[in-house]
Structures are given as structure tokens and as C-alpha cells.
């Protein structure tokens, strides 16, 4: 007689093996047995449904949100039991007290986080990365939580605000390496960095990691290699592009992952995937991150995140609001801006723009920007600026940047050596909500489009990321493993609607997806946090999440 039995479901154990009808018995925080006719003091009905390991989201930005929202919503609604934060180098530790506002303003610009929310929600009772994880442990989490040590945070730790201006000296590199070693010893998931031209921080300047030279970055990588555990995550750019990752990975010995391999106009995603296949056959362990979600943002011209890699737009971040509005009204400025927007990596695809929210003109909502521009006799960018200025920059515009080529996305999702990532959960909270990535994959891509068998999809959400990070006893249903378990209905599972709510500290708003369909039960370390589709408030007190241990990785 065990504590709990999940009865009557089809078990997909996370290895990719076919499902089998079985009960799952749980004792304490681990799985006791899997088989027929098991008995427990409590039972959860899984009849007609799938019982699988809890999903693992390897690309989140919950570094700050974990303090005021230990459930890590909305990921917990979509079957996720373990998250990896600190992606792209944007951890909030290590951080000296004098640099807390710099970290907050960096996150504001590069990850669309509200500075007032960060000020109110982060306890700042830590400086080192070890102290940060200690602070998370003391408060507790509902989901399992781990994070990379971020390169941008390391540079600010060693260089102060000069991290935004120059490469590091050898002595400063050693300070960074020592801080990174301390984080790894405390349980960090590895090292994360960004060289991506789209990552622009406070005052419109490149984020600090982009000021790193190759020698600095390789020294940090060698630190991870010497430690022998952890993953290195890169958002590629200059001086570290995608082809550079393969020889570097072989030299370092730890797995690398990069974000992201998506379908974009003008970028040959097939060539990059085939390069990865070729290099993996030669022994490289590099994992491109792929996603089933189209990359869709909702922006305002108050903070046009997706335009920020154009210098003329990035410069506005350091200017007063009145100056920004004056520029939008200035035909000569708009002409120069349009010219630069044609040259950026993620250049606007005006045919995808629609007006998503307009309180003063609800009749415009849902209308395409290109059609509105034709009515006005102007370019789409001119129309966008005019509509924004007419209502004090409040209107929101929805745009698709990429990953909307259905055939191309389906092809990428089935490539061996590509891992699911880039949900960006916890970031861009007012602009997109891709935390429903697991339910999207299972509903739209597996059930409706049949891109892969259900057991393979479950493996890609569980066993594959667990093996990549070396998450001990997670990502699989087997006796002795931690009881991170999701139960879902494969016939109805889907992400559900997205809505805008105001539930963050400092009365800040965000997009969320809190009503998926087909998600029945969810357990973290043996504790139910969702039963029969309803979140359990008692789990807020139990906080069963852990900072998972890392072991060998693939």
C-alpha cells in the first residue's frame, strides 16, 4: 500500500518506447512501482489518458518571477515540472548591490520585464550565485527550478558598468571564472551567453556579453569543461557564430545548445540542421533549439522590442518620451528608420502585422497594417507610427517574425539532435506567451498534423532534455525516479486561449495562458499540484519543487 496510485492510464515512460496500460505507484517523492493492480492510500484516475514524466522546459527566464510566483505560471498549467532559467546570459546573479538597477534596466530592455515589478519582487538578499540559489531554496518553489550562470551578470560582477563598454582584462576574466566556478559548485545548470544582434540592453546599447571577445568566452567555457557538469547555452552572433560552436564544443567537452533554429525568410534552416547532423556524426554534441510555436510578438511603439536591433530605434531608449514621439511624427526620421529596418536580421514582415489592441478605435482591431497603410496612402511603417501617435502610443500591434512555415517547422521538429526550446517563459511578458509549447506540440502538431508519434513527442519533452542536462532521476517514469508526473488527454490537449492579466508586483500586466484543455493531473516530486484540471492551492504551501542535481549528460 503506497501513498498514491495513478490508475488506469497509458504509460509513456519518456524513453520513446510505445505506451502500455499500467498503474503508477508513488511513495514519498519517488516512483515505487509501475504495473497492474497497484494499491495506494489515495488514487488518481487516469482512465483513457496518458501518464508521462513531467515536461522539462530548458529555455525560460523565470530568474526573478520565481520569487513572487513559485508556481511559475503559466508553465505549470501546461504540464511542466522542471524549468531552466538564466538563458541567453541574463541571470540576476552574481550581482553586487551597486549593479542591481543595471541588471533590472537590462532585463527591462532585452526581456521586456517591468523595472517596478523587479524592484518590488526580487528580495535582493543575495550577491553570489550560490546565495541566489540559497534564497530560492529558502522560499521554496512549486516546480523544480535551476538556472544558468549568465555571462552578462558575470561581466557586470567583474567590470561594473564598463561591461557595457569593453572587453575584459585577463584579471577580470579570472574574476568571472571564479564566480562561475562558485555557481557551478552550488548547482547551476551551466553557462549561458548571448552574442545575438537582437539583444539590446539599457540605453539602446548591446548587452554586456556582446562586448566579450573570443578569449574571454573560451576561458569561461573551459571553466565549465573543467568542472565536468553543466551545459553551455549560446545565442549566436559575432564573434561566436553557429559554425564556431562545433570545434569549440569538441575542445571543451560539455554539451552546447544554441537558440534558436527556426524558419525565417532568407535563412536556410535546412542547411543549418544538416550541418548539425554532419557535425554530430563526427562526434560534436551541439543541440540546436527548435520550437513548434510561430515567433509572434505584440508590441507598442512605447517599447518596440522587435525593432530595437536597428540603431536608430535603439537610440530612442536613452531619450525622453517626448523625443520618441517627435521622431515618430518626423517623416525624415521615419524614412531613415525604414531603411535601417530593411537591414536588420529579423526585419519586419509588414504583411503579418495586425492591430491587436486599440481602446480608442476597436474597429481597427484585427485589421492588417498593410491594408490600413493603403487606405492612408502611406507605407506600413508610416501607418504604424501614425496610429500609435494618434493614441499616445497605447495601441498594440501583433507581428510574426518567423517560424510560421508549417512544412519547415514540421521538418525541424523531427530532426535528431534538435531539442525543444525557446519558450522564453517569464520573459517578454507583455509581448508574447509561448509557455504553452508542450500543449501546442501535443495538440496541434502530434494529434492534428501527425508530425511524430505521441511517444516520441513525450520523449522530446522529457527524456531528451533530461539527458542533455544530466538531470538525475528525472525525465522518465521508472521505479526509483522522482515522481514528476503529468496526466493528459491526448484527444483534447491544446494550449487554450491567451489573455492579458494584471497580477504581477507593482500592478504590472502580462500575457498568460492559464486555461489549457486536456491537462488533468500534475505531480512534482510526488505532490499533486493539479488534480482533475484544477490547480491545488495547498501546493502553494507545500512547495514541493527542488533544485535538481546534475549528473552525466548526453
Image (tube, grey):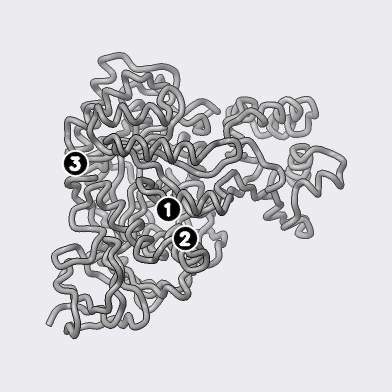
- According to the image, label 1 marks what residue? 414
Residue 182 image offset from top left, x and y in percent: 19, 34
Q: CA distance from mark 2 to mark 1?
A: 7 Å
Residue 395 image offset from top left, x and y in percent: 70, 49
Residue 113 image offset from top left, x and y in percent: 48, 44
Give residue 451's mark: 2
Q: Nearer the viewer, residue 168 or 80?
A: 80
* Element on which disc 2 rests: loop
State the quadrant of the N terminus.
Answer: bottom left
Which residue is painted at 51% across and 43% down in the image?
A: 112
Residue 330's place in the image compared with 456, above or below, is: above
Which residue is painted at 35% across and 20% down in the image?
A: 214
- According to the image, label 3 marks what residue? 186
Q: Nearer the viewer, residue 133 or 307?
A: 307
Q: Earlier in the sequence, mark 3 or mark 1?
A: 3
Q: Are marks 3 and 1 in contact (CB under 8 Å)?
A: no
State the quadrant of the C terminus.
Answer: top left
Q: CA distance from mark 2 to mark 3?
A: 40 Å
Amino acid at each position: 500500500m503506497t501513498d498514491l496510485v495513478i490508475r488506469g492510464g497509458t504509460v509513456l515512460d519518456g524513453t520513446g518506447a510505445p505506451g502500455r496500460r499500467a498503474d503508477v505507484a508513488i511513495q514519498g517523492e519517488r516512483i515505487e512501482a509501475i504495473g497492474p493492480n497497484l494499491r495506494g492510500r489515495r488514487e488518481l484516475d487516469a482512465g483513457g489518458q496518458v501518464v508521462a514524466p513531467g515536461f522539462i522546459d530548458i529555455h525560460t527566464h523565470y530568474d526573478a518571477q520565481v520569487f513572487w510566483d513559485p508556481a511559475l505560471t503559466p508553465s505549470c498549467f501546461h504540464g511542466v515540472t522542471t524549468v531552466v532559467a538564466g538563458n541567453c546570459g541574463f541571470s540576476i546573479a552574481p550581482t553586487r548591490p551597486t549593479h542591481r538597477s543595471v541588471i533590472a534596466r537590462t532585463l527591462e530592455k532585452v526581456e521586456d520585464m517591468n523595472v517596478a515589478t523587479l524592484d518590488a519582487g526580487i528580495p535582493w538578499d543575495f550577491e553570489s550565485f550560490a546565495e541566489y540559489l540559497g534564497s530560492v531554496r529558502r522560499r521554496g518553489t512549486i516546480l523544480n527550478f535551476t538556472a544558468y550562470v549568465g555571462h552578462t551578470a558575470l561581466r557586470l560582477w567583474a567590470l561594473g558598468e564598463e561591461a557595457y563598454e569593453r572587453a575584459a582584462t585577463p584579471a577580470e576574466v579570472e574574476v568571472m571564472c571564479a564566480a562561475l566556478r562558485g555557481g557551478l559548485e552550488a548547482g547551476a545548470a551551466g553557462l549561458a551567453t548571448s552574442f545575438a544582434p537582437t539583444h539590446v540592453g539599457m540605453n539602446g546599447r548591446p548587452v554586456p556579453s556582446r562586448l566579450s571577445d573570443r578569449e574571454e568566452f573560451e576561458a569561461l567555457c573551459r571553466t565549465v569543461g573543467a568542472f565536468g557538469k553543466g551545459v553551455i547555452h549560446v545565442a549566436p552572433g559575432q564573434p561566436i557564430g553557429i559554425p564556431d560552436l562545433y570545434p569549440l564544443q569538441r575542445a571543451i567537452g560539455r554539451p552546447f545548445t544554441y537558440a534558436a533554429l527556426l524558419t525565417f525568410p532568407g535563412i536556410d534552416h535546412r542547411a543549418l540542421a544538416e550541418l548539425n547532423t554532419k557535425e554530430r556524426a563526427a562526434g560534436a554534441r551541439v543541440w540546436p533549439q527548435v520550437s513548434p510555436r510561430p515567433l509572434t510578438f505584440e508590441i507598442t511603439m512605447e517599447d518596440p522590442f522587435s525593432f530595437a536591433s536597428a540603431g536608430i530605434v535603439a537610440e530612442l531608449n536613452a531619450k525622453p518620451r517626448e523625443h520618441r514621439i517627435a521622431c515618430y511624427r518626423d517623416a525624415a526620421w521615419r524614412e531613415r528608420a525604414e531603411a535601417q529596418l530593411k537591414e536588420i536580421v529579423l526585419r519586419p514582415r509588414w504583411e503579418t502585422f495586425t492591430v491587436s489592441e486599440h481602446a480608442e478605435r476597436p474597429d481597427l482591431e484585427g485589421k492588417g497594417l498593410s491594408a490600413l497603410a493603403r487606405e492612408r496612402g502611406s507605407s506600413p511603417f508610416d501607418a504604424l507610427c501614425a496610429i500609435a501617435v494618434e493614441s499616445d502610443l497605447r495601441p498594440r500591434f501583433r507581428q510574426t517574425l518567423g517560424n510560421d512555415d508549417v512544412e519547415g517547422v514540421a521538418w525541424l521538429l523531427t530532426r535528431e539532435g534538435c531539442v525543444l526550446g525557446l519558450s522564453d517563459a517569464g520573459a517578454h511578458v507583455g509581448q508574447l506567451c509561448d509557455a504553452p509549447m508542450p500543449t501546442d506540440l501535443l495538440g496541434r502538431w502530434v494529434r492534428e498534423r501527425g508530425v511524430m508519434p505521441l511517444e516520441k513527442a513525450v520523449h522530446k519533452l522529457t527524456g531528451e532534455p533530461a539527458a542533455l542536462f544530466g538531470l538525475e532521476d528525472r525525465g522518465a517514469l521508472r521505479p526509483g525516479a522522482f515522481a514528476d508526473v503529468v496526466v493528459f488527454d491526448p484527444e483534447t490537449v491544446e494550449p487554450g486561449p491567451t489573455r492579458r492579466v494584471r497580477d504581477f508586483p507593482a500592478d504590472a500586466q502580462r500575457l498568460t495562458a492559464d486555461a489549457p484543455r486536456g491537462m488533468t493531473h500534475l505531480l512534482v516530486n510526488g505532490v499533486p499540484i493539479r488534480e482533475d484540471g484544477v490547480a491545488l492551492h495547498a501546493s502553494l504551501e507545500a512547495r514541493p519543487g527542488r533544485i535538481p542535481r546534475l549528473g552525466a549528460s548526453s
